[in-house]
Amino acid sequence: MKVFLTGVLVTIVTLISCAQKQNAKKNISKDMTTTTNTVNTATDTATFGTGCFWCTEAIFEQLDGVIKSTSGYSGGKVANPTYKEVCTGNTGHAEVIQVVYDPKKITYDELLEVFWKTHDPTTLNRQGADVGTQYRSVIFYHNNEQKEKAEKYKAELDKSGAFDNPIVTEISPYTQFYAAENYHQDYYNQNGDQPYCSIVIRPKVEKFQKVFKSKLKH
């Protein structure tokens, strides 16, 4: 998979990596309530990590059939983690998005396709200039069907040679999701002129929109 950013931007991106999100406006009120899968039976839930959750959310929320996309933390050992705690890499959490979607409009298979094609699943604990276990490529499955599909897709991609290097995406059972601080939610749409958004997220979003044009909300 080709890297989204050209070499000339590497130094710039390093300086404004997602790890520097502490420089964003301070969160005033944080909803630390754990999000659980309590949506009605007409919807389903998926949890993905593709690096910085700002990027992941900006992509998945555009898909037709996605009802809600929430940035947060999963896969760790600390209850109600703060962003600062997650950034240390010591809580075990990954930055993820929790997607509530209508399976009649978009399937889990289609969500997986978007997942694999919008980040590099071959770099361990890293996406671009964002480095750390919190930026790992990960799928947290909610049931056996999701597990089987994720593992099958991963195996087929590895076998096909679609990527130059082996896929290192973690596939683990979903246990808990904690919504991130308010200022992280819908970040790209609210802060599109910020350097990280314009240099890192926008090129990913534009490429995604071209590849998945037929799957976008109208």
Image: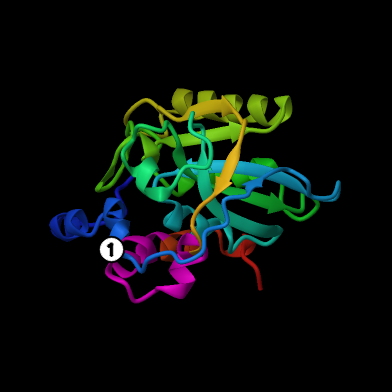
Q: Is residue 28 above or below residue 124?
A: below
Hey, what amino acid is under mark 1?
Asn
Q: Nearer the viewer, residue 109 or 30?
A: 30
Dividing the picture into quarters, in which one does residue 200 lie? bottom left
x%, y% of residue 151? 58, 25
Residue 190 is covered by the magenta coloring = yes
Which secondary structure lies at badge 1? helix
Q: Is residue 34 above or below residue 162?
A: below
Q: Is residue 135 above or below residue 25?
A: above
**Which region shows up in magenta?**
183-204
Dividing the picture into quarters, in which one does residue 137 lie? top left
Q: Nearer the viewer, residue 148 or 164?
A: 148
Q: Residue furthest bottom?
A: 193
- On the rendered structure, is 108 left or right of 156? right
Q: Number of labelled discs?
A: 1
The residue shown at (28%, 63%) is 23
Residue 203 is covered by the magenta coloring = yes
x%, y% of residue 203? 36, 64
The residue shown at (62%, 31%) is 174
x%, y% of residue 35? 66, 47
Chief secondary structure of the magenta span? helix
The quarter in which the N terminus is drawn is top left
Q: Residue furthest front?
A: 28
Q: Nearer the viewer, residue 89 or 108?
A: 89
Q: Which residue matches tag 1?
A: 23
Label 1 neighbourhood size at 10 Å, few (<14), some (14-19), many (20+)?
few
- On the rendered structure, is 56 left or right of 46? left
x%, y% of residue 197? 35, 67
Q: Nearer the viewer, residue 107 or 39?
A: 39
The quarter in which the C terminus is drawn is bottom right
Q: Is residue 107 visible?
A: yes
